């Protein structure tokens, strides 16, 4: 008699598929709730960011009558993603727990709070870089006595997108550490292919909203530092180079 397909109720992987679906539904529900909250609180977010940037002498405008709707949607989506990523990481680790040794799971759980710190640090760093780049640009235009009109949707979307993507990028040390602990990728692989990692970082920062070379450099440097620091800390404390 032929073996039942793995996706059937008699298949050995069926319970795992049900577990994955349950966890994804939970994460999806959190994303929807957080997105709705961000959508309705977009005015507070806009006021906060505009006060943070302190763009004096700049005319901040809507360019279309219904642009505020797009801005609210963008704010909601970004809030949803920020709220969902830590929960997604936790759900993934919980799902993998039976396949991990106690020591491996304990180490990964201990570094989970660090992922929240790294994501927050990346988001704040991206926003701060955008702040100073924008201030430099507008100060230059003021010195040239050139008027400025700022599209609020494009501006805030660029700021929030840069912060969000940098927050996600700052999580790669956690991903590297987990992959090395699970022996999926060896420490030596990262060590021997750092130039390719740098190339990926370069492409990543170039694709971010800030279009100038200076901001690309400022965004690139912490990624390199985190990469090298991850390898050093894994070698000293977790001994992943011995796996």
Image: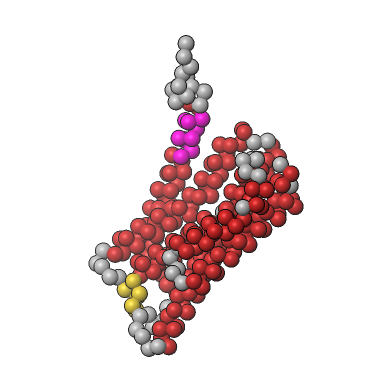
- Quick check: is 20 in the magenta stretch? yes
The reply, left or right, for residue 110 in relation to residue 83 is: right
Q: Nearer the viewer, residue 202 or 85?
A: 202
Q: Is residue 119 visible?
A: no
- Quick check: is 81 in the magenta stretch? no
Boundaries of the magenta span: 16-24
Q: Is residue 88 visible?
A: yes
Q: Nearer the viewer, residue 226 or 164?
A: 226
Residue depicted at 34% across the width and 84% down the height: 147
The reply, left or right, for residue 141 in relation to residue 223 is: left
Q: Residue furthest left?
A: 65
x, y (%) of residue 135? 46, 78
x, y (%) of residue 99? 62, 33
Residue depicted at 40% across the width and 55% down the height: 77
33 versus 151 height, above or below: above
x, y (%) of residue 10? 47, 19
Q: Nearer the viewer, residue 34 or 121?
A: 121
Tally the marks: 0
Quadrant in which the C terminus appears: top right
57 versus 43 height, above or below: below
Q: Quadrant of residue 218?
A: bottom right
Q: Magenta stretch mostly in which secondary structure?
A: helix
11 versus 241 height, above or below: above
Residue depicted at 51% across the width and 45% down the height: 88
The colour scheme applied to this rendered structure is secondary structure
Q: Residue furthest top?
A: 1
Residue depicted at 56% across the width and 44% down the height: 90
x, y (%) of residue 114? 62, 54
231 versus 60 height, above or below: above
């Amino acid at each position: 008699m032929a073996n039942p397909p793995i996706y059937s109720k008699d298949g050995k992987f069926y319970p795992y598929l049900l577990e994955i679906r349950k966890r994804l539904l939970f994460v999806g529900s959190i994303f929807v709730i957080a997105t709705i909250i961000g959508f309705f609180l977009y005015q507070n977010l806009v006021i906060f960011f505009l006060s943070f940037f302190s763009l004096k002498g700049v005319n901040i405008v809507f360019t279309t009558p219904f642009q505020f709707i797009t801005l609210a949607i963008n704010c909601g989506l970004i809030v949803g993603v920020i709220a969902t990523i830590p929960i997604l990481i936790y759900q993934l680790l919980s799902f993998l727990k039976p396949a991990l040794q106690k020591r491996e799971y304990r180490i990964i759980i201990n570094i989970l709070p660090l992922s929240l710190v790294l994501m927050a640090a990346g988001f704040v760093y991206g926003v701060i870089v955008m702040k100073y780049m924008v201030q430099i640009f507008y100060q230059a235009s003021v010195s040239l006595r050139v008027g400025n009109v700022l599209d609020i949707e494009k501006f805030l979307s660029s700021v929030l997108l840069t912060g969000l993507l940098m927050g996600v990028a700052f999580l790669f040390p956690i991903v590297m550490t987990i992959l090395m602990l699970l022996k999926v990728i060896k420490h030596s692989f990262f060590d021997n292919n750092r130039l390719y990692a740098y190339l990926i970082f370069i492409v990543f920062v170039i694709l971010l909203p800030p279009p100038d070379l200076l901001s690309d450099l400022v965004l690139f440097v912490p990624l390199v530092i985190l990469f090298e620091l991850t390898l050093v800390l894994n070698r000293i404390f977790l001994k992943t180079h011995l796996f």
